[in-house]
Image (cartoon, grey):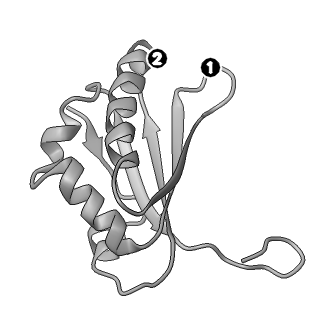
Amino acid sequence: MAKFVEMDESNTLKDQMESQVTGPVILINKFNVKSDEVEQFLKVWEEDATKFKDQSGFISAQLHKGIGKSTVFINYAVWESLKHFKNAVDKVMGPDPQSRLNNYPKSLVVSPHLFKKVSVPGICGD
């Protein structure tokens, strides 16, 4: 069964979902999967991504794969707001998100976390 691992144990995804933030949020989701299960992972991820894409507040998403023989993937998704993201999760994942994870390969380890853009003068803008 796919395994859920917090990216930041001191501030869990559940904690983040209860935050009071305004403006766009970024979901970064790290996926580790065994090489012989990559095709299955990509198939199920595409199904889920298509459902999320159809939700209100979705701005964009991009899946990245580690180079070389890496089987690490990163999803970078932008949402209009935390509220939009939470509503989308409720609609797509339902009341038991673990049941949806059961469609993914058994080797999958998934680590989602929410972020806000940071402005650093002269390097990265707001």
Which of 73/117 is in front? Answer: 117
Residue type at mark 2? Answer: Ser
Which residue lies at the image location 43% right of the left edge and 20% below the top edge?
38
Q: Quadrant of residue 121?
A: bottom right
> What residue would you read off at disc 1?
69
Q: Which quarter of the figure is the N terminus placed in?
A: top left
Task: Count the numbered circles shown.
Answer: 2
Which residue lies at the image location 37% right of the left edge and 25% below the top edge?
41
> What residue would you read off at disc 2?
35
Extreme residue toward the top, this view: 36
Which residue lies at the image location 22% right of the left edge and 38% below the top edge?
101
Residue type at mark 1? Answer: Lys
Badge 2 marks a residue whose secondary structure is helix
Q: Which mark is residue 24?
A: none
Q: Which quarter of the figure is the C terminus placed in?
A: bottom right
Extreme residue toward the right, this view: 122
Asked if the residue at tag 2 contacts the one at tag 1, i.e. Cβ–Cβ closer than 8 Å, the answer is yes
- On the picture, is 15 further left or further right than 49? left
Badge 1 marks a residue whose secondary structure is loop
Say if 90 sits above or below 42 in the image: below
Q: Dot 1 surroundings within 10 Å: few (below 14), some, or many (20 or more)?
A: few
Q: Quadrant of residue 82?
A: bottom left
Say if 2 sits above or below 41 in the image: below
Say if 119 sits above or below 106 in the image: below
- On the picture, is 66 further left or further right than 126? left
Distance (Cα) linking label 1 and label 2: 8 Å
Whole-percent x, y for residue 3 in the image? 27, 41
Q: Quadrant of residue 69?
A: top right
